[in-house]
Image: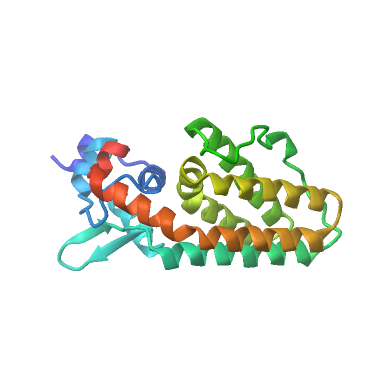
Amino acid sequence: MQDSDLYPTAPDKAAEAYHRIKAALYRHRHRPGAFLNIRVLAAKMRVSPTPVREALIRLADEDIIGFTRGRGYVAKALDLEEVAGDYEMALTMARLAIERDPSAPFQSVSDLRPDFATDVRGLDEAEAALAASYVENLYDRIAILSGNVRLIRNMRQFSDRTTHIRQFGLMSAPPFFSLVNQMSMFEDAMIAGNRTAAIAILEDQIRRKIRGLQDLIKELNLRAQQARVPLEDLL
């Protein structure tokens, strides 16, 4: 009996496997360098190995996981240079979107703005998730200004890749909360139509975030290495 007989494959199974595995990877709780066993992952998700293999190929093409000849697909540790590059790219996309058409209306997300404040402690998990969601929705609204589908997609992928880093920073490093406050200032400037000031605020916010990445990524990689949680247990 073939695997496909046990677990029928629908056209969207590969996409479902891709999104589930990617979400687990972005939690950064698995051991870096761990081998990703296609059959184990397939059994956990109750699909045939084919959609899992397709998902891993796609994730490797996007450089989310690694591929070693003779061994297969492996989980990657967070890389400071890559993450900093993601933020630099996001800043470039945001500046382009804001400057492209000054008459394009900006859609506020002030209803999502966190109403808690702290400068002496990190946020708890629920607070961090709310604050991160506010920031990510702002990035999305910025991208929409461009009217460019590819730019919007790339900005959303940036938010996906960095959401756990963002939330971890808010929970463990109180100064990072000031960056959320800066995003509120950015939004206020956009609402007021002062896009030059908004860009300056955003540039400062992202530059400060990049400077703080080294300690965050080091801590996240250390925790992942110590946790030794198999990826399939995070699905």
Residue visible at 55% across and 39% down? 120
Relative vertical location of residue 42 with respect to residue 126 in this rendering, above or below: below
Relative vertical location of residue 151 with respect to residue 140 in this rendering, above or below: below
Of 106 and 15, nearer the camera is 106
Q: Is residue 149 visible?
A: no
- Looking at this rendering, what residue extends furthest in the left direction? 1
Of 38 and 99, nearer the camera is 99
Whole-percent x, y for residue 9 in the image: 31, 41
- Split into 4 quadrants, where in the image is the C terminus? top left
> Disc count in the image?
0
Whole-percent x, y for residue 140 in the image: 65, 50
Whole-percent x, y for residue 96 in the image: 70, 67
Residue visible at 59% across and 56% down? 155
Residue visible at 74% across and 62% down? 199
- Left or right, 229 with respect to 199, comes to left
- Left or right, 176 with respect to 99, comes to left
Relative vertical location of residue 51 with respect to residue 71 in this rendering, above or below: above
Location of residue 154 (image quadrant) = bottom right
Relative vertical location of residue 81 with respect to residue 48 in this rendering, above or below: below
Q: Is residue 166 visible?
A: yes
Residue visible at 52% across and 54% down? 157
